[in-house]
Amino acid sequence: MSSQYVEALPGDKLAEGAIAGMLAELDPHSTYISAAEIASVQEGFQGSFGGIGVWFEVVNVTPRVSSVISDGPSESVGLRAGDRIILVDDSTAVGPASRRIQYRLKGRIGTDVKVSVERRSVEELIDFNITRGKIPLYSIDTAYMIEEGTGYVRINRFATTTHAEFMQKVAMLAEEGLERLLVDLRSNPGGVMEPAVQIADEFLGGDYTIVETRGRSSATRRIDKADAGDALEAIPVIVLVDEFSASSSEIVAGALQDNDRGLIVGQRTFGKALVQQQFPLTDGSYLHLTVAKYYTPAGRLIQTPYDDANMTNYLEGKLAIEKNIDALPDSVKFVTPRGRTVVGSGGVYPDLLVLPDSSSSLLHPLTRAVLNPGHDVRFVRNMFDEEREAWMTRWKDRKDDFVASFDASKEVLPRFWRSLESEGITFGSGSQFNQRDRLDATPTIATFLKARIAQQLYGTESWYPLTYQFDREIMRALEAWKDAEELAGYHGWTEQE
């Protein structure tokens, strides 16, 4: 090919394509990772990267700092939320260049980068010389007491740091009176296997099986067992899952379900029971190769079929079609120690199935017209561009007061309705929506505006406590503690008087 093809062929690209093509014939999860890609792939697993410590969004082709990480490199030199990044190392960061800014701000820990920003009410650009530091990539989005005695933890992926993060959050919740725990693994694609095993272990007493891996080599054949004496062994627990909960998420859900330890709520999971290992090549690239399959404690292989006919649906999570368990063949049915029927082949079936709610207030036509295109996001972002200092002065150190007393329907909703007119959303005679629509949608939209403002004031995780009442799976889970407590009772839990 290199000598006869009509055009000259770059040898490295040809080799990479050949390797990737071979791996694609094996399974959907065996992949080739080039030397240029490996750093960004591994940082997600490692839970940190070298950077300057800011969250930013691109607004009108200009990167805008939305928040700075506390005690991070940017905060220490004075970079602020609301600053617009104009230059990086004296080269533009505006326009097409904004698409690559994250790669320019990242780099080896200890190296320097010059960032020039535009700040409201300051005429000249402000230059900052920032030394890159170790920036955490947290795998837990939020943890808080969702009700008295009930803790909620949302895990977005499994990295090497996840177990330590999880236990830190649990300790925080314990100080606030934790009696039962809701663990949210929805849309969690998995990641590193070991922290999933460690988290499942926290809920299981000694000698319970967590997961079994079976591969061709002895190194890939093992059974992970729980240790005794962990703090969460008897606490009632519910795990939320959906069709995009995969891999390590399914290890946790499968272990708790098969051992009659926790209640699984939501939709059927993705069904990825293939274990990958990275093998380095001489040029710095890696093979991400499937080396084993994993089985839940009851012996279930929950891998969803991925043959040619099903590949597209598999990758998009569209095979998680709910079925009546009684209609499934006996070959995919398994029985737990307490006699509950669980199903293999195609994900983890929830104990409590929760399907989308067609009556949700989020489906009101006006609510959808406002929230789906992000009008609420733009309104609050623009408002803080103009009034950040005033908002910070009034509310920054009064989070509890804000949550308890701020009324978005009175303070910002009238301005929001007016702003929608410039977006083509009008009310009244001959308009798409009438005053009744506005009245019906007000409680939902006002709540979302309040949550967006809270994000600006206190950080991203402030969103969750203000909006969970619109989450059907969470609300159903909060009604199911009796079933979760029955399972916990098999493991030593007793109801407190």
Image: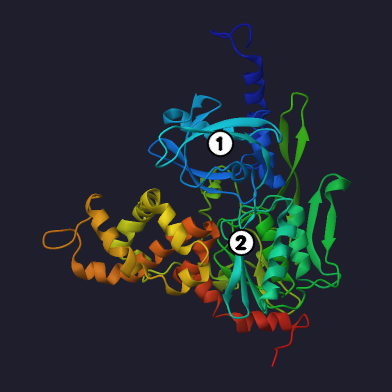
Q: Residue 133: in sight, yes or no? A: yes
Q: Which of the 4 image quarters holds residue 419?
A: bottom left
When the figure is inspected, residue 337 is found, relative to residue 416, above or below; the finding is below
Q: Secondary structure at mark 1?
A: helix
The percent coordinates of residue 96 (x first, y second) are 43, 29
Residue labelled with disc 2: 185
Q: Is residue 158 above or below residue 203?
A: above
Q: How many marks?
A: 2
Image quadrant where one finds the C terminus = bottom right
**Picture coordinates of residue 200 (x, y %)?**
74, 65
Which amino acid, by three-letter code, is at mark 1?
Gln
Task: Confirm or deny contact between disc 1 and disc 2 (CB under 8 A).
Answer: no
SS type, badge 2: loop
- Splitting the image into 4 quarters, where does residue 308 fall? top right
Task: Return the disc, 1 or 2, that comes first in the chain's sequence.
Answer: 1
Residue 471 seen from this side: no
Quadrant of the rendering where the N terminus is positioned: top right
Q: Residue furthest left?
A: 429
In the image as oriented, which residue stretches furthest toward the right?
218
26 or 227, nearer to the observer: 227
